Structures are given as C-alpha cells and as structure tokens.
C-alpha cells in the first residue's frame, strides 16, 4: 500500500493508505485527529476546515496522495501553541460562541484564515467579508461568530 | 427524618423544606428523587391527561420504580474537592451541563469549575424521566438537583463541625472551603469521606433563598467552551472504541425503500479497506478502515430496490391529502371575518452532526454509544431487536452535535446494533449527509386555516384548524411502553392531540377560541422538530392578527398589546417595540414585523426588519440562496427565572436563525417518493449571508421563582415576525412557507448511487482560499 508523508500540527506523519482516500479520513480515522468534523463530505458545509501551509482548505476534498512531504497541515488542535489559546479561540470563549460545538473548529479555522487574508490585503473586516463565510452552524451561532471574529482580529 | 442527618435544626417539614437522601457510599453521595412526591398540604400536581394516565396504569413496570431509592439523582463529593453529577438528560448544545453545574455550585458554594457534569447512561428505573424534550430540562430538574446539592452541603457542614469542634452555626462554606470564625478552614474534599454515610437515609433540607443567589441568574460562559474551541470536545464519532471501524449504509432511492437484491456484494467486500458488506433491514451496510472507503463502497454497490413507503408521492399529492383531512371550520358567522389558509412544506431537522452511533454487540450483551434524548426507549428497542434482556444492553449517552428534535429518535443506534450483531464486530456507524437529508426525519408538511370574527372593536371568536402529515411522537415520554402505545391508532391520536393542546396557548383575548389538530399519512419519517407545531401555528395566527388589526383600523403592535391578556406578555411585546423602534419610517420594499409567542411557561416577542428590494433579494450567492434579508432582529424573552442568562440569549439567537430559515429559505421538495435535497448546498438553512447584521436579545427581569422552558422558545415568534415583515414589505400576505419553496434553487443530486462522490479539487494550490 502506498506510503504518504506530510506534516500535521508540527509533526511529520506517515500513513499507509490508497492515494484517493481524502485527507479528512486520514486525519480522523487513521491519525485520530478528530477536531476537523464531517458535515457533508462534499466541501459545502466547511465543518472540516483546516489550514494547509497557512491557507484554509477542506480536507474532505483533498486526496491524501496529493500531499507533499513538506506540506504542513494545521487542524484546530494545532492552532494554538502550548496551553495558550490563539486570539481567535480566546475571542470565541469571550463571546461564548459555541452551542453544540460541532462546527466550531471549522468556524475558527475559517475565521483565522479570513482575518489573515483581509490583513494581507491591508484592510479591516467588513460585513461583506463576514457574509462570505460559508461555514454552516445549525445551532445558529452566526451573530456571535461575527462579533468574535471582529474581536479576535483586533488581537491577531 | 430531620435534623441530625441533614445537619439542619430540628423542625417540622414546612413549605420550604425538601426531602432527599444520603446514600451509603465511601464518599459523600447526596441524592434526591427526580420527581418528588407532592409535599403534604400542597396543591395536587396538575393532573396528567387521561390518555396518558390510562397508558401508564396499564403497566406494572411502574411498580419496579416504587422502591424509594431506585430513581434518585445524586451529587457526589470527591476527595479531590470536585463535585460530580450524572445528568439524566442529553446535552445537544442547549447548555444544560453548564446550567446544571450552576445549580450545584449555588447550593454547594463551590466554584463552578469544580463541578463536573456528565451525561447519565440509560437508566430504565427513571421511567419517563429520562427524556430530553419539550424544553423541559431546567423546569423539571431545577428543584431536585438543588435538593441533592443542599443535602451534600448540610452533610459537609456537619462533618466540619465535628472536625473543627465548632457548631454548624459558626461555620461558613465559601468557594469550596468550610471555615470557622477563627479562620481555620477545611476543603470539602478533605471532608468527603467523613461526610459519607454507611447506610442510606432520608433527610430534609432547605434550599438557598433566591435573594442569596450568587451563581443562578448571573451570566456564565459554557463550561465545555474550551474543549469546543480546541477540538477536544468529543462527539460520538470522535470516540476511540476498540475495533469499531467506520460503517455506512447504502440506502434506497426512495423514502424507506427496501433491498431487493445485491449484484456485487463479494466484489465490494474486496475493495480497498473494506472489511464487511451485508444486507440489513434499511439497506446494505459496509464497514471499512476509513469512512472515505465506506463512501466508495456504498457508491460501488449495485442494488435493486423495492419501493418505499411514500412511492409516487409529491408535494402536490400530499397537499391534496391534507386538504381532504381538514376538519371543518363550521358555518361562517354573520359578522365580519378575517380568514386565511397557509401551507408549510416539509423541512429537515438534520443537525450538523449526522445520525450516528457506535455499537459493540457480543453474544449475550451489547454496548451502545450515541447522543440520545430518549435513551430508555432506545435501550429497550435495541434489546428487543437483538433478542437480549434490557439489562444486557448498556446505552451510553454521548454529547450531541445538535438535535432540533432529531435525537429524540435513535435510528442510527438501532441500525448500528443490527449491523454489529450481523457481522459480529464493533461498528462506528454514520449516515452520509445525503442519507440524513433524504432518509432522515422531517418536520411534517402541514396546512393551517384560521378564521377570526369581529364586530366593532371586539374580536368575537378565533378558530384554527391545523392539518399535518403525522408527527411521529413514537419516542413517547421516554419509554418503550408509551412509545408502543403511541403507535396504536387510538393512542397516537390521543397523544398528538394532547401534545397539541398542551403546547398551544391562546394568548389573545379573542373571545371563543377553538384550535384543532388533524393528522394524516404515516408514510414519512417525521419527528418533533424544534418547537414542534408552534412555529407554523403561530406564524399563521400572527399573519391573521396583522390582517385583523388592519381591517379594524389598528396599528399591528398596539392591537396585539391591547388584546394580550397579562402583564408579562404585554411587557415583552412593549420591550421589542420600544427597543426595535416600532413604526419608524422605512424605505419602500423594506418593513418591520412584530409577533408574540407563549409556551413552556415563558413568553417571547420578536421585532424584525426585512429588506425585500430586488437588489437585495437577487444578490448573487454561490451554491446558496440570498432572498429577502432580515437586517435587524430584536427579541425579548421572559423565561421566568433565567438560570443562565447568557445561555438563554444563545438559545434565542439560535431560535431566530431557525425562524428566518423556516419563513424564507429552508424546505424539502418531495417528488416521486423522495426528497430532492441531499446536502447543505440544496437545503438552505440560514447562513451568514442571511444573518441579521443587527441583533439584540433582551432577557426580561425575572418575574418568577421558577425557570420556564427556553430551548425551543425562540423559533415561533421569530418565524412569525419575519413572515409579517415580508407581508408588509411586499404588500402581499405570504401564504406558503418558506416563501421561496416554489423556486427550485439547485440541481438535484442523483439518487443512485445514493450518496455523491467525494470531491478531489480541494487542494487548489495557489488559488484563492476556501
């Protein structure tokens, strides 16, 4: 069986599995990294949102065979360093965003990528930016998410 | 019975004393009955509806619960100073583990972070008291949990008195430490063993008076929030149960279709990673090393299917059935009337976490893990399916990723048990989103007809006939025998009617009022979606109230205010009118809407502003719908005593998002025996681009010493307010919901194979981020 080597949350990992198995299942079912959640499997709900080399991606749509050994995958588990929370995670706590919590790892990873993208464009977050977030929250925490992203952005 | 055991002074059991137990254990375990007997002299409890009483009386199972200590809930104090409690309810996002910990922290005077609330396994001895539903958790557990905690406190104080040589009256318990006046202190952890009892004994206790509350009623963040934002919170599919490999089911192309034959089982078993493929009662189950390989295997199966329970049915044919089943409104009175008929299409109560369960079935026993709101029924149904005694089936209740009514049922747990038994291996079974959307439970399609008669400035009568595809209330009140009774034609009609009447208050002083429910057609997988009948019933009523006010020449807000029957109701309505700026000038194509709803001993009002201008409605959205935008929502709630106001606010926010979805965007389209929607790019639940950028929740000062229900409360008034605003903005009262149902805004995905392929274009190196 093919061997795939890449980096996850700062560590190099190697898995033996067929090329076409999507990264979401490699993370969850083979590596036991369960922060990224399944919500649709077709890259529309965004519950699995993680970062690849610093950009938001959806592991449910990435065949593991396409990863290179130098590729750095960051899941919610790897967002913070040590016990200190990332400013966006802290903003999530301050605004008590989570209800069931199922979508929130993906929401936070999407939020961090959005803030970084907007910052790179040299501008502040707008309502249109927030409207453009595609992550679904079936508990309907959208309003607190908007507040938390604005607060988190100030501390990033 | 009193005094020394509880550590409280000797006195007769008065109005403010409650009975509980100290349970024999090596560490302090204090307990209370979940449903205490009515205290002597107290008014009799509200009589149960006759139908239910008869059902319960049929069952000698009840006698098993007669043992005085069989149905206790208990608070345990540990030597490390923590306090634990196993809550016999399901946490699915509504925040009850946090509010429960707050009750214990209040009575025990321990820091909130020392309280660990877990979810209890199925406990059949609790009978129907292990059902999470009807927004009832806090209402039903508010007193018993505090009683148990207060008994623990009293025992700890007694133990400390002996240790410190100081009478209890000279001791204070604060932040988990008991101190005397000299300043000597002992942590409760050090007293946990000394305060324990070698025999179980009944004691009585007083509860902390409301004026002394320092935890209850103050906003607290969720205790599980840190786990949620770090990815550490574990849902069923995150559990690491040995050998429980990913499992999925290849499902029929029509609702509840059955397997005829499978052409290539052996071939599929030989696919990469696949360990098993087997026909079960709901389809063909495949087990593999990863879910990705399950998806490929499901798609590879070649199955011939037999027709399902809704063969050939469509929105149009169900609408005809509903009209045929409508109960008459009676003769039209000679006075002026306002009348309207409304259609509410099927909606999905799919949570973001799909139906899922882990099952490990061995010879002679079984163990199940799933987020279950009726775990006792699940345990009994699984035992029956497996042919095992109930006592041999252990059911663990896991934290749920949302429910909205879905987790009242245990479809995945039953299925997982069947697969595990059939292949003789543990399984981690998950429904694909397409399964969850097309074969999962739905809010039944319904029509509601309203007629109001009036004369001069008086409303003479209000009649509403709600006709619905049958709602499966087969989870009963949490037990297999009521669940089975609900499936009998007679029992079910009685139960649904009872539920309808218990949940539908008539808050307006509209003279003679009659509201009746008729149900028809059991061919669908239905369930009690968040707020059950109320969003549709209230939406129809509030739209008619707007018409009535206009006909009578009154302002829609003032009219409601004048016809509401009590101060609490008028107060929430007045609050949103004031805070939301009711009546302010709005540009053409935009408008306000206001609505009221009372349920679960709570009252609520919502004011929204909506933008229905073409440039807003037609804004481009990729794989989604824009439509009218609710630009502002103001919601006032009086849920009696709000244990955790921050959690209450969160529940109202979620209810508003549901209300917006129900009014504007989200429905299922039934065609030829199946639902067209197969995922979130077809089923348009509220998204960020539909969310009101301006939103305010107002928690009213508590008017009660008792908490009311809140988990579902926010939906009805919100849906109704959005519908009323839409009608005002467009000049036409909407009569069909959601308002975009007539336009199919997506290309339906195939039904064979039943689930879509996994995309492979997610890497998009160098392209824009996701």
Image: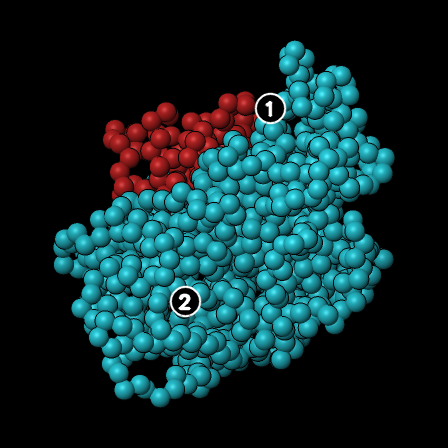
Chain colours: A red, B cyan
Q: Position of residue A101 (x, y in %)?
A: 51, 43
Q: What's the chain of the residue with tag 1?
A: B
Q: Position of residue B604 (x, y in %)?
A: 39, 54
Q: Quadrant of the C terminus of chain A?
A: top left
Mark 1 and mark 2: Cα distance apart in space: 46 Å
Residue B313 appears left or right of B265: left
Residue farthest toward the bottom in the current orientation of the protein: B331
**Which picture quadrant has residue B60?**
bottom right
Residue plotted at (36% across, 49% down):
B636
Residue plotted at (32% across, 86% down):
B332
What is the secondary structure assignment of the residue under circle 2?
A: loop
Residue B200 appears left or right of B222: right
Q: Position of residue B433 (x, y in %)?
A: 52, 58
Q: Which residue is mark 1?
A: B175
Residue farthest toward the front in the current orientation of the protein: B12
- Number of numbered discs present? 2
Per the rendering, the mark at residue B506 is 2
Residue B598 or A67: which is nearer the viewer?
B598
């Amino acid at each position: 069986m093919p061997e795939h080597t890449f980096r996850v949350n700062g560590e190099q990992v190697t898995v033996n599995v067929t090329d076409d198995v999507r990264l979401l299942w490699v993370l969850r079912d083979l590596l036991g990294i369960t922060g990224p959640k399944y919500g649709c499997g077709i890259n529309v709900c965004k519950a699995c949102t993680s970062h690849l080399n610093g950009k938001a991606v959806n592991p449910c749509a990435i065949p593991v065979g396409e990863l290179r050994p130098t590729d750095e995958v960051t899941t919610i588990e790897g967002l913070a360093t040590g016990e200190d929370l990332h400013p966006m995670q802290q903003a999530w706590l301050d605004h008590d965003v989570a209800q069931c919590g199922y979508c929130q790892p993906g929401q936070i990873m999407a939020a961090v990528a959005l803030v970084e993208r907007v910052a790179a464009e040299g501008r502040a977050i707008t309502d249109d930016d927030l409207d453009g977030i595609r992550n679904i929250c079936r508990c309907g925490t959208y309003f607190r998410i908007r507040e938390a992203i604005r607060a988190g952005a100030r501390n990033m | 019975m009193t005094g020394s055991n509880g550590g409280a002074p000797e006195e007769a059991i008065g109005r403010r004393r409650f009975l509980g137990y100290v349970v024999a254990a090596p560490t302090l375990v204090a307990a209370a009955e979940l449903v205490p007997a009515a205290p002597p002299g107290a008014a009799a409890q509200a009589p149960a509806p006759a139908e239910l009483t008869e059902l319960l009386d049929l069952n000698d199972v009840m006698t098993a619960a007669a043992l005085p200590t069989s149905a206790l809930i208990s608070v345990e104090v540990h030597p490390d100073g923590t306090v634990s409690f196993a809550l016999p309810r399901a946490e699915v996002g509504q925040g009850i583990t946090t509010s429960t910990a707050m009750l214990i922290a209040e009575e025990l005077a321990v820091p909130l972070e020392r309280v660990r609330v877990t979810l209890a396994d199925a406990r059949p001895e609790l009978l129907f008291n292990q059902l999470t539903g009807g927004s009832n958790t806090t209402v039903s557990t508010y007193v018993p949990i505090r009683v148990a905690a207060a008994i623990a406190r009293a025992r700890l104080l007694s133990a400390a008195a002996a240790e410190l040589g100081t009478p209890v009256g000279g001791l204070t318990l604060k932040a988990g430490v008991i101190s005397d006046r000299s300043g000597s202190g002992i942590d409760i952890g050090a007293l946990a063993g000394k305060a324990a009892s070698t025999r179980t004994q009944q004691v009585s206790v007083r509860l902390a008076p409301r004026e002394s509350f320092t935890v209850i009623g103050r906003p607290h963040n969720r205790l599980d929030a840190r786990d949620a934002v770090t990815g550490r919170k574990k849902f069923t599919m995150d559990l690491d149960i040995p050998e429980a490999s990913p499992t999925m089911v290849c499902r029929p192309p029509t609702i509840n279709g059955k397997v005829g034959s499978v052409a290539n089982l052996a071939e599929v078993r030989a696919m990469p990673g696949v360990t098993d493929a087997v026909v079960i009662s709901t389809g063909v189950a495949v087990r593999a090393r990863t879910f990705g390989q399950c998806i490929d295997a499901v798609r590879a199966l070649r199955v011939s299917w037999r027709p399902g329970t809704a063969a050939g049915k469509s929105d149009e044919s169900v609408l005809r059935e509903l009209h045929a089943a409508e109960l008459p409104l009676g003769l039209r009175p000679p006075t002026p009337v306002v009348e309207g008929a409304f259609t509410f299409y099927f909606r999905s109560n799919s949570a973001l976490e799909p139906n899922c369960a882990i099952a490990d079935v061995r010879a002679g026993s079984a163990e199940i893990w799933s987020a279950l709101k009726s775990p006792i029924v699940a345990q009994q149904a699984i035992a029956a399916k497996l042919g095992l005694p109930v006592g041999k089936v252990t059911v663990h209740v896991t934290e749920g990723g949302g429910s909205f009514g879905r987790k009242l049922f245990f479809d995945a747990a039953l299925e997982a048990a069947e697969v595990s038994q059939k292949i003789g291996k543990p399984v981690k079974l998950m429904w694909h989103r397409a399964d969850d959307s097309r074969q999962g439970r739905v809010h039944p399609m319904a029509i509601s007809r309203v007629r109001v008669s009036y004369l001069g400035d008086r409303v003479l009568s209000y009649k509403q006939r709600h006709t619905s595809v049958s709602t499966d209330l087969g989870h009963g009140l949490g037990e297999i025998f009521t669940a089975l009774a609900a499936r009998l034609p007679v029992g079910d009609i009685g139960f649904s009617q009872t539920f309808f009447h218990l949940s539908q208050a008539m808050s307006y002083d509209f003279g003679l009022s009659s509201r009746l429910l008729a149900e028809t057609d059991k061919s669908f997988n239905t369930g009690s979606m968040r707020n059950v009948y109320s969003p549709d019933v209230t939406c129809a009523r509030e739209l008619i109230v707007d018409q009535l006010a206009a006909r009578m020449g009154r302002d829609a807000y003032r009219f409601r205010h004048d016809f509401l029957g009590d101060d609490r109701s008028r107060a929430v309505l007045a609050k949103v009118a004031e805070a939301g700026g009711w009546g302010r000038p709005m540009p053409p194509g935009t408008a306000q809407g206001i609505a009221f709803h009372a349920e679960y001993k709570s009252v609520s009002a919502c004011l929204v502003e909506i933008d229905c201008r073409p440039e807003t409605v037609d804004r481009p959205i990729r794989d989604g719908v824009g439509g009218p935008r609710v630009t502002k929502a103001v919601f006032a709630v009086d849920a009696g005593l709000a244990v955790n106001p921050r959690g209450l606010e969160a529940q109202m926010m979620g209810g508003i998002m549901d209300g917006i979805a129900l009014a504007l965007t989200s429905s299922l389209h039934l065609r030829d025996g199946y639902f067209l929607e197969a995922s979130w790019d077809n089923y348009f639940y509220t998204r960020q681009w539909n969310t009101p950028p301006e939103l305010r929740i107002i928690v009213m000062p508590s008017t009660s010493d008792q908490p009311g229900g809140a988990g579902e409360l926010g939906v009805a008034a919100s849906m109704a307010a959005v519908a009323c605003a839409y009608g005002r903005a467009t000049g036409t009262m909407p009569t069909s919901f959601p308002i975009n149902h007539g336009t199919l805004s997506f290309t339906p995905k195939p039904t064979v194979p039943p689930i879509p392929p996994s995309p492979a274009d997610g890497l998009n190196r160098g392209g824009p981020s996701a």
